[in-house]
Amino acid sequence: MKMLRKIDDSFETVILSVLVLAIVLVMLLQIICRYILNDSLTWSEEFCRYCYIYFMFIGTALSIKERSVLRVDAVISLLPEKVGKILAVIVDILVFLILIYLAYWSFPTIKSMYFKGGYSPALKLPVYIIYLSIPIGFILSILRYLQHFYRMIRG
């Protein structure tokens, strides 16, 4: 149980840290190759771009877990506290339903990319691997919202 709790607590953080570290190391390698060895890497920009794409989708799940999602509180702060809490729950439910919708419709895109068989220009990665960031991020976000709803009902 402790192992699952530790994974739950730091899953996104570890992945995001690895992605940032990879971006920094590849960019450092690119700088060294370009300015010291007078030869640049052909794949570094593409690699960093794909890492950043994954970073954004997984980072969304982390922001949901940490309850640091951007939203406008101006309207909520003008309302009575009970009404504001109800409105916040309604917004959470709407966002949750939108995430389900987006996750569901991301799979036909992945399927299409898989069967088209395209590859990225520099890294020669199958394009569907890059597009997998979409359902991964949405599914992680859905799971984090489910945890949030569970804690809300329980607490």
Image: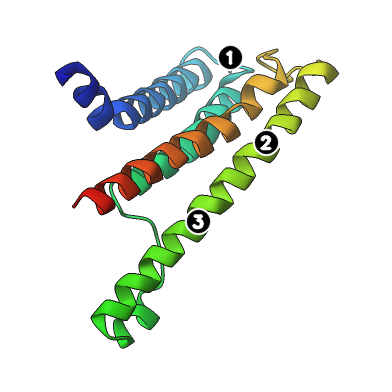
Looking at the figure, which quarter contains the N terminus? Answer: top left
Write the residue at 46% across / 58% down. Answer: 93
Residue situated in front as seen by the camera: 77 or 151: 151
Residue drawn at x 24%, y 80% as measured from the top left: 81
Q: Which mark is residue 39?
A: 1
Q: CA distance from mark 3 to mark 2?
A: 16 Å
Pair 3/1: label in front: 3
Q: Is residue 76 above or below residue 151?
A: below
Of the residues shown, which amino acid type is indicated by label 2? Ser
Task: In the rendered view, tell whether residue 11 sits above or below residue 75.
Answer: above
Task: Give the mark nearest the N terminus, 1 or 2.
Answer: 1
Q: Residue at x 61, y 26 (%)?
A: 132
Which of marks 1 and 3 precedes in the sequence? 1
Residue 28 position in % (x across, y down): 41, 23
Residue that carries the numbered disc 3 in the rendered image: 95
Residue at disc 3, secondary structure: helix
Label 2: which secondary element: helix
x then y, percent, for residue 91: 45, 65
Q: Residue at x 33, y 79 (%)?
A: 83
Q: Is residue 130 left or right of residue 139?
A: right
Q: Which residue is mark 2?
A: 106
Q: Residues within 10 Å of mark 1 (few under 14, many from 20)?
A: few
Query: In this rendering, would 56 be left or right of 119?
Result: left
